[in-house]
Image (tube, rainbow, N blue to C red):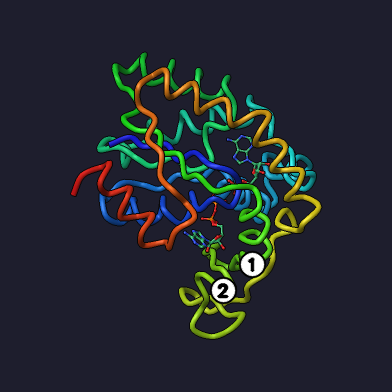
């Protein structure tokens, strides 16, 4: 099962992708997480990506595409995967289609998690990320057991730099300009499915399992 998660930044793609990965036993591949891990480890890729991420801009396609194509060709992806945060531009979608086509494969579903811009600002302001394992929480909607401490690894939680209000506005504009056209792209491909992302996390997931099957 090959699934793409679409939606604005903060729509809940990562939250749902983790649940899909756990239920259907496929890897969760988040390009944002891959870049953040590279930044943490001080790699060349991380240094390049950071200059764009800090400004709320997309990392250039040529830095993203090969990385994802390599990743989906790894052994653990033979049964499928859930892509979170990729593709984010039409050229990325075309490059993915081409790479899969060469292998005689295709994406099964592109799930668009719909959340209006007004809700996004609140979502991002309350999002907290673990400095250790990268797990994400929300102050109100997905709180940790102990305030400010990761449930999984016990490390400290922070507000991501790119979740600060001024950068969120920029990221939303970038989303509308560069990523939203993918909705038409996958509609035309006949694999777009929409879910209401404004309801509770478990209700969003229930809608997704109705699409993907039990
Ligand atoms: P994305 O991966 O699309 O950027 P996340 O999955 O990180 O978004 O979710 C953004 C924030 O909103 C997180 O703090 C998350 O806990 C919270 N969140 C996710 N889904 C919901 C939901 N259905 N209702 C309320 N809050 C949510
Ligand atoms: P995310 O965690 O998915 O919200 O991604 C955080 C940031 O990483 C984005 O704002 C972009 O700067 C960068 N990024 C992640 N995925 C991609 C992608 N597919 N293409 C370009 N930039 C990306």
The quadrant holding residue 77 is top left
Question: Where does the image place residue 129, in percent across and percent down from the top left?
Answer: 60, 65
Q: Residue at x 38, y 31 (%)?
A: 73
In the picture, measured across the screen, residue 205 lies left or right of residue 123, that is left
Cβ–Cβ under 8 Å for marks 1 and 2: yes
Q: Ligand 2 shows up in which quadrant of the image?
A: top right
Q: Measured along the vertical axis of the image, is residue 15 above or below residue 29?
A: below
In the foreground, 204 or 57? 204
Q: Residues within 10 Å of mark 1 (few under 14, many from 20)?
A: some
Circle 1 is placed at which residue position? 126
Q: Would the CB of label 1 be found within 8 Å of ligand 1?
A: yes
Q: Residue at x 27, y 35 (%)?
A: 78
Label number found at residue 82: none
Question: Where does the image place residue 66, in percent across and percent down from the top left?
Answer: 54, 27
Cα distance between the residues tagged 1 and 2? 7 Å
Q: Measured along the vertical axis of the image, is residue 134 above or below residue 197?
A: below
Q: Would the CB of label 2 be found within 8 Å of ligand 1?
A: yes
The quadrant holding residue 81 is top left
> Of callouts 1 and 2, which one flags the residue occurring earlier in the amino acid sequence?
1
Q: Measured along the vertical axis of the image, is residue 185 above or below residue 18?
A: above
Question: Where does the image place residue 38, in percent across and percent down from the top left?
Answer: 63, 48
Q: Residue at x 48, y 49 (%)?
A: 13
Dot 1 falls on a residue whose secondary structure is: helix
Q: Quadrant of the N terminus?
A: top left
Label number found at residue 140: 2
Question: Where does the image place residue 58, in percent across and percent down from the top left?
Answer: 69, 35
Q: Residues within 10 Å of mark 2 (few under 14, many from 20)?
A: few
In the foreground, 130 or 112? 112
Residue found at the very far bottom of the displayed protein: 146
Q: Residue at x 39, y 19 (%)?
A: 189
In the picture, measured across the screen, residue 26 lies left or right of residue 136, that is left
């Amino acid at each position: 099962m090959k699934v793409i998660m679409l939606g604005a930044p903060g729509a809940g793609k990562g939250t749902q992708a983790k649940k899909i990965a756990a239920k259907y036993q496929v890897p969760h591949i988040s390009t944002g997480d891959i870049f953040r891990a590279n930044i943490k480890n001080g790699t060349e890729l991380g240094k390049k990506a950071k200059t764009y991420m800090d400004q709320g801009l997309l990392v250039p396609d040529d830095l993203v595409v090969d990385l994802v194509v390599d990743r989906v060709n790894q052994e653990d992806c033979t049964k499928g995967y859930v892509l979170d945060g990729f593709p984010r531009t039409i050229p990325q979608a075309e490059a993915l289609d081409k790479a899969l086509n060469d292998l005689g494969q295709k994406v099964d579903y592109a799930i668009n998690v719909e959340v209006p811009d007004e809700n996004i600002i609140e979502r991002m302001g309350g999002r907290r990320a673990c400095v250790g394992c990268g797990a994400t929480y929300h102050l109100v909607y997905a709180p940790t057991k102990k305030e400010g401490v990761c449930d999984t690894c016990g490390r400290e939680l922070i507000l991501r730099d790119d979740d600060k209000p001024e950068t969120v506005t920029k990221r939303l504009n970038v989303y509308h300009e560069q990523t939203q056209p993918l909705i038409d792209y996958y509609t035309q491909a006949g694999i777009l499915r929409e879910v209401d992302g404004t309801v509770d996390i478990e209700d969003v997931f229930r809608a997704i399992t109705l699409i993907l099957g039990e």
